[in-house]
Image: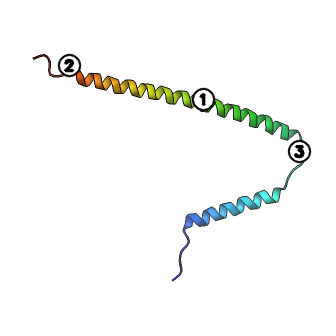
Amino acid sequence: MKQRVPRGAVVALGAAAIFLLGTLGQGQSPADAGDATSRQLAAEVLAQHRAVVENQTQIEKKMETLAESLRLARIYASRGGKGGAK
């Protein structure tokens, strides 16, 4: 009996082949002013990425603090006021 190849594997293989053919056909272009611009843009993107990572770290710290505050509030709420004085 003939085994069937999964459709996803065929699509992935086809996409990889098209990508490789496209990159091999281009070759290397000589360095020019566009190369310097590309470096500058890459440096700017890297700086923005670092800022995003730093902001994400700060957000995670604040979320941890908030989660701890909520946990403590739930503990205090569960201990106080239920049932009244006897």
Query: Which is more N-terminal, label 2 or label 3?
Result: 3
What is the C-alpha distance between the residues marked 2 and 1? 42 Å
Q: Report the residue marked by disc 3.
A: 31
Query: Tag 1: residue type?
Result: Glu
Given residues 54 and 3, the one toward you in this image is: 54
Query: Which is more N-terminal, label 3 or label 1?
Result: 3
Report the side of 55 relative to 24 (left or right).
Answer: left
Question: Which label sits in the foreground, 3 or 2?
Answer: 2
Report the side of 63 relative to 11 (left or right).
Answer: left
Q: Secondary structure at mark 2?
A: loop
x, y (%) of residue 49? 65, 34
Q: Secondary structure at mark 1?
A: helix
x, y (%) of residue 44? 73, 32
Can you name the residue that lies furthest to the bottom here?
Answer: 1
Dots 1, 3 in contact, CB < 8 A: no
Q: Report the residue marked by disc 2.
A: 81
The part of the image, by quadrant, that contains residue 9 is bottom right
Given residues 44 and 83, the one toward you in this image is: 83
Vertical relation: 66 (above or below) 7? above
Vertical relation: 42 (above or below) 77? below
Name the disc covering residue 54, or none: 1
Q: Secondary structure at mark 3?
A: loop
Residue at position x 32%, y 23% from top?
73
Task: Specify how the rendered protein is coloured.
Answer: rainbow
Query: Tag 3: residue type?
Result: Ala
Query: Tag 2: residue type?
Result: Gly
